[in-house]
Amino acid sequence: MKAEKTKVFSNFIWGLNMLREKLEHQKEAQLALQKQNKMMVLSLSHDLKTPLSLIELYSKALEKGLYKDEQKNREVVNNICSKCEDIREYIDEIVKTTSEDFLELEVNNGEFFLSVLIDSIRKFYTDKLGMLKIGFSIDPFSDCLLSGDLDRSIEVIQNIFENAIKYGDGRMIEIAFSREEDCQLIHISNSGCTLPDGEIPHVFDCFWRGSNCGSKNGSGLGLYICRALMHKMNGDIYADVREGNMIVTTVFTLS
């Protein structure tokens, strides 16, 4: 090819090489993480064998009536319950290991104003909710400087809004504010929550979907990602239901 003063082609090739190297590094890191997770799962799976064998042994003894003493029977039953609790802890650790860090969520913590975050949400959702005929209100607030990543914070609020649109009754979505010590709380509520109270603690679990999802599409990752991002920004997120309204609260540290 004929050389050009702008060196467009050489710059293009250089860019491709940089992209290739980045993809190779990402692939190597992903393989290393997968290997580490598999080793952890194998180790925990091996640890499950001991309590399982003891439960099997105790169960067979009870089935055959080997223990004539009632106190001994109660002791064996307590041992079985204890081993079941050990197994539950192992399973929780396996679930945590297999779900942790499978998404690479980079966060660039800094400072941003609350008003900038809220203005971004207002601009994005005013028209969208208007077209969907969903009421939208934002309570007055005092501006302040927050600690975190502005882009990631917008992503968190948008994820919450998309859930509110999908699972609410389509009447109203509201944003309210409060302060607790050195934290700014943003409360996002939607009307028409049909999620049972017993399922609320699980809404931030990986791949979990509530009984109210019906035929609605979803991966069960939205709120899980929100929690991961908030924790990386030294914040928090929680949910509760009040008077039929689903309220998701994000907690930002004041800068």
Image (cartoon, grey):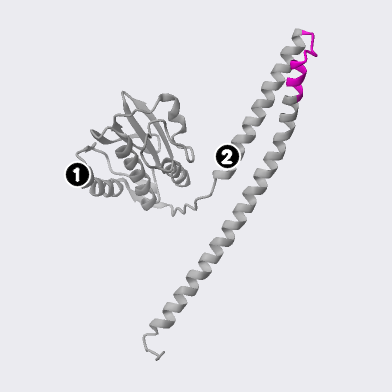
Number of other residues with Cα within 10 Å of mark 2, as a class: few under 14, some 14 to 19, many 20 or more: few
Q: Residue at x 25, y 45 (%)?
A: 125
How far apart are labels 2 and 1 at the CA level?
40 Å
Q: What amino acid does circle 2 point to?
A: Val
SS under mark 2: helix
SS under mark 1: helix
Q: Quadrant of the N terminus?
A: bottom left
Name the residue tied to disc 2: 95
The residue lying toward the viewer, choosing from 17 and 226, is: 17
Residue 180 location in percent, x, y? 38, 33
Residue 243 location in percent, x, y? 31, 23
The residue lying toward the viewer, choosing from 109 and 171, is: 171
Dot label at residue 153? none
The residue lying toward the viewer, choosing from 213 and 21, is: 213
Residue 114: quarter of image:
top left
Q: Residue at x 71, y 37 (%)?
A: 47
Q: Over which residues does the magenta segment extend?
A: 57-69
Number of other residues with Cα within 10 Å of mark 1, as a class: few under 14, some 14 to 19, many 20 or more: few
Residue 150 location in percent, x, y? 36, 51
In the figure, 186 relative to 71: above or below? below
Residue 120 is one of the magenta-drawn residues: no
Drawn side of residue 201 relative to residue 52, left or right: left
Number of labelled discs? 2
Drawn side of residue 46 relative to residue 225, left or right: right
Of pointers 2 and 1, the one earlier in the residue sequence: 2
In the figure, 101 relative to 137: above or below? below
Q: Residue at x 62, y 48 (%)?
A: 37
Q: What amino acid does circle 1 point to?
A: Met
In the figure, 98 relative to 18: above or below? above
Dot label at residue 131? 1
